Amino acid sequence: MNESEVRQNKITKEWVIYAPARRKRPWDFQKPEQERAQPPPPHDANCPFCPGNDHMLESITMEIKDENDNGLWGARLVPNKYPALTPSDGINRYTKGIYLAMKGFGYHDVVLETPYHNRQIGQMSVQEVERIVDVYHKRYRELMEEKANMMIIIFRNYGRRAGTSLIHPHSQIISTSMVPVYIRWREEMALRYFDEWGRCVYCEILEYEMKDGRRIIYENDHFVAFVPFAAEVPFEILIMPKIHKANFGKTSDNEKSDLALALKSILERLRKKLNDPDYNYIINTSVRYRAEEPQLHWHLLIRPRLTTMAGFEIGSGININPSIPEDDAEFLKND
């Protein structure tokens, strides 16, 4: 593709501009050597997440042991020391003049993915990543038992450009007592598609991508990873379950193992091919009361932080992507 093209995201109906004239070679997206920090040590005496520093933690909500029994824990869940939301406040709305407000009810957890200060997911064993997925799944199910929790977001920020503040490998889980307009809108778009066509838009995309093959970069028994047709940023990746499920909490043990395998493989590939880029990933799953609806299909979205949003993007809401999805997929899947 040599000329500009505008593609529509089939799920959200948002448009993305592809501008080959601004295109870089795939290796030009690699993080420059001068931006790479010195490799951290396996243990940091000043890190609150490292073994031996339990006194720096508020408490430990959950712990999964290391099956190798090396004296270290495998993964942990702890409360965020600086939470965005707390469970101590109520959920009642109230007015302030003409405005609506509510107390900041919710939970804000940190998943300590490994006791090792310098071991990121792409460098872990599949067994280690399975422990992380297991913490996600168990905590998600626990939080959904409390009816005040309307939405749960599981996410990971990696690198300064992605918003991380601590080096130690970790991800986060936040629950809220309200559902933002963006999430409602995304679910509404999926519902409109189902009402019109009688099928899940995610399943249709998955079926087409598996048949087309050009944007697929990884597949196992339960999951497919691909660069979306209308990727908003270079090397954006969706990891999507083959079996239709709206709710991440319904994931089986076999599916959790394959999710760990897919996640490790993709992050290992990004680390190797793009020189360890900053990124965010998010598990998008149904909100409360929509867990069984046929139009929704949970998935994991990875967005590397390789470009910067500028004036046109901010003003129009339309992303300009200089990288072509088919080229990104080809680059990532070839060794």
Image: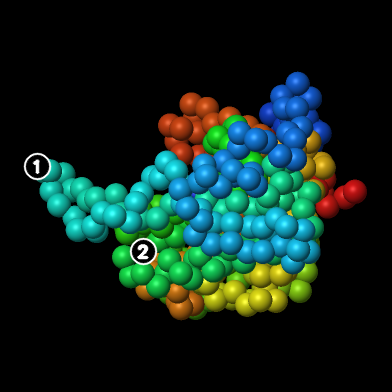
Whether residue 282 can be seen here = no
Mark 1 surroundings: few (<14), some (14-19) or many (≥20) residues within 10 A: few
- Disc 2 from disc 1: Cα separation: 27 Å
Residue at position x 29%, y 49% in the image = 104
Q: Which callout, 2 or 1, points at the residue further toward the start of the chain?
A: 1
The front one of 169 and 258 is: 169
- Residue 210 location (% of width, % of height): 74, 67
Which numbered mark, 2 or 1, is in the foreground of this view? 2
User: Disc 2 on helix, strand or loop?
Assistant: loop
Q: Residue furthest top?
A: 34
Residue lying at 78% horizontally and 36% vertically, measured from the top left: 275
Residue 10: horizontal and vertical position, in percent?
55, 59
Compared across the picture, whether 127 is left or right of 99 comes to right
Of residues 20 and 33, the one drawn nearer to the viewer in this rendering: 33
Residue closest to the far right: 335
The answer to whether residue 324 is left or right of residue 141 is right
**Marks 2,1: beta carbons within 8 A:** no
Residue 253, percent across and down?
66, 76
Residue at image position (76%, 63%) is: 69
Q: Residue tagged by mark 2? A: 149
Report the coloring of the rendering: rainbow
Could you tell me which residue is drawn at 13 percent across and 48 percent down? 95
Question: What residue is disc 1 on?
Answer: 97
Question: Which residue type carries mark 1?
Answer: Gly
Quarter the N terminus occupies: top right
Q: Is residue 16 left or right of residue 322?
A: left
User: Callout 2 environment at 10 Å: few (<14), some (14 to 19), or many (20+)?
Assistant: many
Where disc 1 sits, the SS reads loop
The residue under label 2 is which amino acid type? Answer: Asn
Estimate the x, y position of residue 145 in percent, counting from the top left: 40, 73
Closest to the observer, 15 or 332: 332
